Image (spheres, helix red, strand yellow):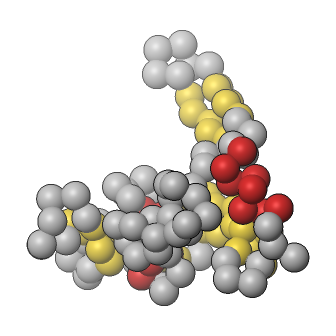
Amino acid sequence: MINAPIGRSLDSIIKRKVTPRGDSAITHYRVIKEYLDYSYLEITLETGRTHQIRVHFSHLGHPLVGDDLYGSESKRIERQALHCQKIEFTHPITGEAIQLTAPLPEDMLKLFDKQP
């Protein structure tokens, strides 16, 4: 679990950072597989701060592969290696429990194919 408050970075209108003056932010994670220079994680958010996953892992010294804003550009992928596999919520009008899933996209699957 990462429990570190997140607030706006003073030098940017976009960037966020871990700061004692920030709002509570809690990220749960589990390592699924470790590769030579990165890991495949399952992440569950307890809170929903802007850039929460990106900020928390960068703060720990493990930025997302391909995340040029928080410190890890990559030639392996042309974007952040971040994907929402499943989201669950209650429909605000009907009260119905909604669950949506999406498989990993091809560019992320290629990250796993190239590692031992």
Residue 2 visible to an observer of this rendering = yes
Instruction: Please give left or right for residue 111 compared with residue 14 in the image.
Output: right
| Residue 10 pos. (x, y %) | 12, 72
Taking the spot 19% from the left edge, 71% from the top edge, the residue there is 9
Looking at the image, residue 89 lies above or below residue 19: above
Q: Which quadrant of the structure image shows residue 59?
A: bottom left
Taking the spot 67% from the left edge, 30% from the top edge, the residue there is 100
Taking the spot 50% from the left edge, 54% from the top edge, the residue there is 79
Location of the N terminus by quadrant is bottom right
Taking the spot 70% from the left edge, 36% from the top edge, the residue there is 102
Looking at the image, residue 106 lies above or below residue 61: above
Looking at the image, residue 49 lies above or below residue 85: below
- In front: 113, or 11? 113
Q: Residue furthest right?
A: 116
Instruction: Please give left or right for residue 14 compared with residue 24 in the image.
Output: left
Looking at the image, residue 87 lies above or below residue 6: above
Residue 26 visible to an observer of this rendering = no
Marker count (numbered) = 0
